[in-house]
Image (cartoon, helix red, strand yellow):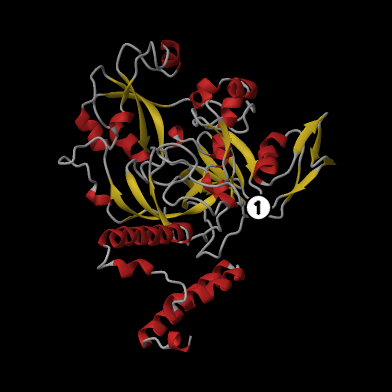
């Protein structure tokens, strides 16, 4: 054994450096049981009692075994490294939809920092890296047990208003695998739970997913814990004060021309993607009566377009544009909580965002707002019978919240499935903050005709 300690100085230096890094990591995580693995690190660098590199002796005698084991060793090391890097430091994220245009564009690839708000200790530690919840060929990419309780390590800052945030989709706890969009609760609202359970040919299996295995969403935080939020005619109010729109915020408009059609050059100049250039067919998209109610003539071209304030102003100055009308409220559909008909996409709330420690009065009038929070996110049994709220079987008039809750919205306000449709984002669903765009691909362009948006390379993506 004495000879095993007789190692070159560089081995002792390597052991010291890696041990220091490991101990600092344990202090950050706060789970000191991991210190039991320190002897293993000592053995890897100094004593070599366990023959980790047994396969290297076959380099000359059996090159096939040596080559195979070399690849396995490299792959295992890479997967373990990627697992911990993605878990605690950062991950990649691709913008799949236009909900944050013009701030973040479809085709943007983001570097998302988990250290900004503090990385979470995984709920499902036994999962395959680089896969969110399902392998490409099917089947879960994680093992549900063990399930660890929510814990967040110390980060660089708290979530702030106007931050762009990546988070796990709260309403994605239960999923009809063949129809994941709209979410399961919206499907139940329209079709009924019994129909969804019975029609597996249409909806597929209904599965439950842990918090960290739910889909990743990215939106802008407009409401913080403790805020009272209201939307009046598309204007957000926080605690009765106007929240000024970010410059990238856009709304959908109906644009009437003088009879001429708009060229692709006009749309390219405005920055409107091909999928958003909608020339209405009055008999299919919007009825003639609806167009007439908005002061539009169905006999002339009418476009449905998402526009920022600057884009709308530029379009209005074109001689061929006759009328620009914002998309009416009724086009937004049902909002959260489903069934509350007096709230709409453009006129929403007021709604209070709970913060940790808040003790709120729960009444029949706000029960629907907080029911999912109390049951799904905070793990209680809750029901209302004869206008009395029962929490864990006890008649209750108040509830004390265990977590902070946020209100997230897209900048593309009329084409964003956000908190107006599925409710609050709990703190344990927060993943991280986008830091910069490392690649951006324009799906409307060819590889030699502007597919790569070079002007977005290394662009800051945090707000």
Image coordinates of residue 325 in percent, x first then y, are 40, 26
Residue 89 in percent (x, y) is at 45, 61
Q: Nearer the viewer, residue 343 or 401?
A: 401
Decide if residue 441 is on the left or right side of residue 332. Answer: left
* Residue lying furthest left: 448
In depth, the one of 284 and 261 nearer the eye is: 284
The residue located at (36%, 58%) in the rendering is 72
> Viewed as shown, does residue 180 lie left or right of 384?
left
Q: 180 or 78, which is in the foreground? A: 78
Is 103 placed left or right of 180 in the picture?
A: left
Residue 232: quarter of image:
top right
Residue 417 can be seen in this image: yes
Camera sees residue 243: no
Q: Point out residue 394 in the picture as x, y percentages from the top left corner.
A: 84, 41
SS category of the residue bearing label 1:
loop
Q: Which residue, as the protein is rendered here, is positioned at the far front?
A: 61
| Residue wearing tag 1 | 403
Residue depicted at 27% across the width and 58% down the height? 64
Q: Residues within 10 Å of mark 1 (few under 14, many from 20)?
A: some
Q: Residue at x 22, y 31 (%)?
A: 266
Q: Relative to 188, does residue 433 appear above or below in the rendering?
A: below
Above-or-below relation of 11 to 259: below
The picture places residue 47, in percent across and down from the top left corner, at 45, 80
In the foreground, 82 or 409: 82
Q: Name the residue: 39% across, 62% down.
A: 77
Number of numbered discs on residues: 1
């Amino acid at each position: 054994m004495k000879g095993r300690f007789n190692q070159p100085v560089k081995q002792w230096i390597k052991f010291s450096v890696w041990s220091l890094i490991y101990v600092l990591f344990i202090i950050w995580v706060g789970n000191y049981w991991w210190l039991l693995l320190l002897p293993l690190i000592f053995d890897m660098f100094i004593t070599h009692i366990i023959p980790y590199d047994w396969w290297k002796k076959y380099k000359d005698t059996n090159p096939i075994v040596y080559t195979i084991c070399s690849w396995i060793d490299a792959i295992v090391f890479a997967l373990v490294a990627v697992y911990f890097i993605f878990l605690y430091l950062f991950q990649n994220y691709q913008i799949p939809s236009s909900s944050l245009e013009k701030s973040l564009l479809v085709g943007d690839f983001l570097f998302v920092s988990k250290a900004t708000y503090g990385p979470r200790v995984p709920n499902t530690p036994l999962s395959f890296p680089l896969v969110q919840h399902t392998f490409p060929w099917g089947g879960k990419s994680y093992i549900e047990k063990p399930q660890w309780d929510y814990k967040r390590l110390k980060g660089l800052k708290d979530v702030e208003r106007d931050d762009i945030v990546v988070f796990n989709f709260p309403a994605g706890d239960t999923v009809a695998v063949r129809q994941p969009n709209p979410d399961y609760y919206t499907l139940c609202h329209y079709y009924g739970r019994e129909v969804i359970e019975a029609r597996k040919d249409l909806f597929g299996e209904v599965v439950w997913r842990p918090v960290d295995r739910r889909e990743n969403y990215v939106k802008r935080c407009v409401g913080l814990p403790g805020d009272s939020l209201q939307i009046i005619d598309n204007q957000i109010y926080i605690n009765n004060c106007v929240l000024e729109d970010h410059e990238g915020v856009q709304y959908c408009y109906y644009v009437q021309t003088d009879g001429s059609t708009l060229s692709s050059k006009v749309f390219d100049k405005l920055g409107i993607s091909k999928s958003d250039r909608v020339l209405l067919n009055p008999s299919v998209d919007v009825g003639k009566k609806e167009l007439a109610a908005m002061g539009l003539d169905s006999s002339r071209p009418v476009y449905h377009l998402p526009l920022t304030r600057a884009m709308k102003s530029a379009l209005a100055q074109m001689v061929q544009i006759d009328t620009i009308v914002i998309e009416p409220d009724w086009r937004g559909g049902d909002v959260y909580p489903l069934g509350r008909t007096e709230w709409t996409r453009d006129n929403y709330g007021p709604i209070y965002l709970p913060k940790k420690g808040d003790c709120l009065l729960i009444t029949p009038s706000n029960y629907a707002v907080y029911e999912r929070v109390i049951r799904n996110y905070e793990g209680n049994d809750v029901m209302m019978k004869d206008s009395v709220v029962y929490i864990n079987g006890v008649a209750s008039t108040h509830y004390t919240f265990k977590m902070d809750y946020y209100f997230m919205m897209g900048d593309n306000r009329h084409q964003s499935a956000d908190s107006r449709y599925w409710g609050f984002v709990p703190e344990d669903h927060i993943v991280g903050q986008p830091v910069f765009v490392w690649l951006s691909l324009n799906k409307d362009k060819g590889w030699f005709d502007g597919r790569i948006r070079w002007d977005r390379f290394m662009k800051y993506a945090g707000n």
